[in-house]
Structure formats: structure tokens, C-alpha cells
Amino acid sequence: MGIRDDQKLATREKVLEAARDLFNETGYEETTIRAIAERAGVSVGSVFTTFASKAEVLSHVMDRRLGDLYAEFDRVVPYLRGSTADRLCSIFAIHYEFETRRVKLFLAHIAASYSPSNDPGVTPYGRNERLTLMLREVLQDGITRGDVRPDLDPQLAIDVLKASYAWNYRLAATCGAQASALSAAMDNQIAFIAEGWRPR
Amino acid sequence: MSFVSLNIESPTDAPVKLTRRALAKQRTRERVLSAARRLFTERGYEGATIRDIAQAAGMSTGAVFASFSDKSELFDEILTADYEVIYAQMKQAGVNGVSVEEGVIGMFAVAYGFHVEQLPLLQASIAVSWTRSETAERRNRGHLKHIFTLLNGVLLRGVERGELKTSADTKLLAEIIWDVYVANYRRAIFDAWTVEALLSRLSDQLKVILAGARA
């Protein structure tokens, strides 16, 4: 890799780190590209040569964070024990624990997934294949182990789980709830849905 | 799109007599609201400034602020008007359903039918709902509460009919159904799903959600 590429990569790193902190401290809408450049110690122009828009910056910030989170999951998932519902509760509890550390950033990520301006370089919330894949594996595993009905359509259950998971962040958004409160709400929802997929 | 509140249209309310001054003021409000609706639809919430809205309505920024204290109040007024248009229909559909599924799908058929027609405005409203101030959020939560009451009513009638278990936690059920309903809009946004496709998916999801609560 040449010096130019090295520099470009370094700029990218600095921009993503500055953006992550600013989005979380002052909010996504309030953060300008200029402020990001200033915090990162790079020129406004160089931010724009690396990213097409602020939405793309947010998308890459989240992508990187989730990369770390899912690397952790790759390690943890094989050791999950208990019923399918228990395993799902653990998976979502880990998510809440991780995301509530930077809750404003995550709220911006959810908000952006409904934003009318969709850039091609953006992966919105809900399009995260890794979460879908992980949930699918746990459900399939449950079918194999016999605590999930074999005729359950996993995709429908995944739709419901993901929708509940995101909606619970309202508790953090509107009443400053902690990760434990979010997990408790999710546990209730999982228990409820699991009652429906119990083999009978 | 009508901005007239359903309350005003209802025959039980006596028509309000307006002075000329009040009439002029109301006309200004309506002009601002229709310009704002158009711009929020085209540019999203953040993309439309009060200055843009004033310009589109052909008046000064000051004149806009005489009617609305800030942009979020203006935006909420538009959402309230829409909400009032569909609330009565959702209520009717919920009551008409002879089963829980019919009631729920009927309610959300009204909502999907209305919002998919003007998706950008809905997107702006959901996006804002995740990041807006607490005061604005409180204002909006009132509407949500009414919809939840409707949904809960449909589920409680299901319990009465013996469709759902008496022990079913209808509040939790209503919450999960709502979450899924909102999340499905992403399918309309990113995959251009039609109202029919959304409803058929919701109906399948509903089967999974209700399975554990069936009597």
C-alpha cells in the first residue's frame, strides 16, 4: 500500500472516530460535517472525498461498531445454553448492554433507517444480515432440539423479535432506561412469542 | 388532504362563528400548513427550514412564527391532522372485525392504506420520533395511546369471545403487534412493498404473535 492509501485510511479512521463521538454527544442531526472534520483534525474536503454524505458516515460508524459486537458473538454463541427463549434473551441482553453505552448513536441509527434520503452507500438498521442469521441459527437449533415447532416460519419469528428489539429502545429514548430495563422488556416479549412456538 | 379536525365536522358540535380577523388568521395557518406538508414530504423534517416553508407559503418568517412557535409544533400539527383523518376509520375497522385477526388487520389496513400513499411524510415522522425532544414526544404519545386503546379493545373482545386465553397479556400483545406494524414500513420504503403485500405479511406475523395467546 502506498503512502497515499495509508493517509486515506488514517483520515477515514479519524473521521469515523470523531463522528461516533459527536453523534453520541450532540446528536446526529445537530452534528455537521464541518464539526466532524474539526474534531478529526482533517479538512472538510477530505471528509467528502472519503464519504458521500453524513448518512454514509453514520452507516460506516455503525458498521464498524457492529463488526466488533458480532466478533464477540462468534465467540459467545457456541456456549449459549438453556431453552431457545433463554438463548434469545441472552443474545438481546448483550445487544442492549452494548448499544446503551452509546444510546444516542443507536437512536440515530434507527431514525436513519426511516429517513427519506437513502444513499446507496448506506446499510440501514434492520438490514443487518448478521443478526438475522444468528437468530435463524438459534431458532433452527431449537427445532432440532425439539423446543420449537418444526412448522414455525423462522423469518416471521425473526421479524417479530427484531421489531420488538428496536421498539424497546424507546424506553431508553424517552425515559432514560438502562440496559437491564430494556432486557427485561425483551425477556417478556420473547417469553410471549416462545409460548406460541412451543411444540404441542 | 383536509386539515379540518374531525371534531369540527361532527354534527354534535355547534359551528364556531369566526370574526374576520380570526378567519384571516386561520387562512394563514392553512397556507403555512399546506406549504409545510409539501416541503416535509419532499425534503424530510430536517431538510425543510421555517425559512423555506415561509417562502413556499408566500409570507415572511415572522408571519409563520406568529402562528406556530417552532418547526416541531408545525410538524406535529400536520401529523395530528392526519391522525384525526384515520383514527375514526381505524376505530370502525377494529370494531367491525368478527375475529381478532380481522379487527387488527382491518385497523392496520386503514393505516397502511393512508400512509403508503404519502410515504416520505411518514418516514420523516418516524425518523423524528426517534430523536425528538421529550416535550414533542409527549405531545405525540397522546395519539399513540389512543391507537393502543383501540388495539387493546380488539384483543379484549377476542378474550370475551373465547378466541384468546383469559390469561393473555393483551397490553404486551398490543405492543408487539404495534412494533411489527411499524417495522414493516421499512419493506415499503426499501423494497417498495404495496399495501396488499404489507397486510399479507402482517397477517402471517400476527399468526406467530397470537399463537401463544389462543384459547
Image (tube, rainbow, N blue to C red):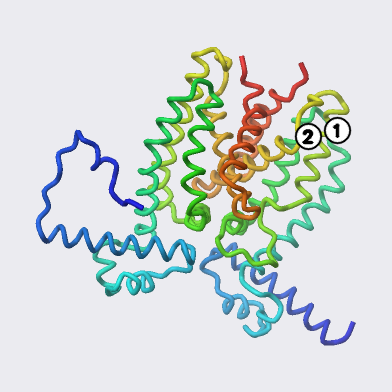
Would you name the residue on which mark 1 appears?
A141
The amino acid marked with disc number 2 is: Arg
Residue at far bottom of view: A3
The amino acid marked with disc number 1 is: Asp
In the image, residue B186 sits, relative to residue B166, either above or below, namely below
In this view of the protein, which residue sits in the foreground, A147 or B39?
B39
The local crowd at label 1, few if under 14, some if 14 to 19, many if 20 or more residues have their Cα within 10 Å, is some
In this view of the protein, which residue sits in the foreground, A6 or B18?
B18
Disc 2: which chain? A
Label 1: which secondary element: helix
Whole-percent x, y for residue A13 in the image: 75, 73
Q: Is residue B175 left or right of residue A192?
A: left
Q: Is residue B161 left or right of residue B142?
A: right
Would you name the residue on which mark 2 appears?
A87
Q: Are marks 2 and 1 in contact (CB under 8 Å)?
A: yes
Tell me which residue sits at (73%, 59%) in the image: A65
Whole-percent x, y for residue B166 in the image: 55, 14
Q: Nearer the viewer, mark 2 or mark 1?
A: 1
Whole-percent x, y for residue A95 in the image: 71, 47
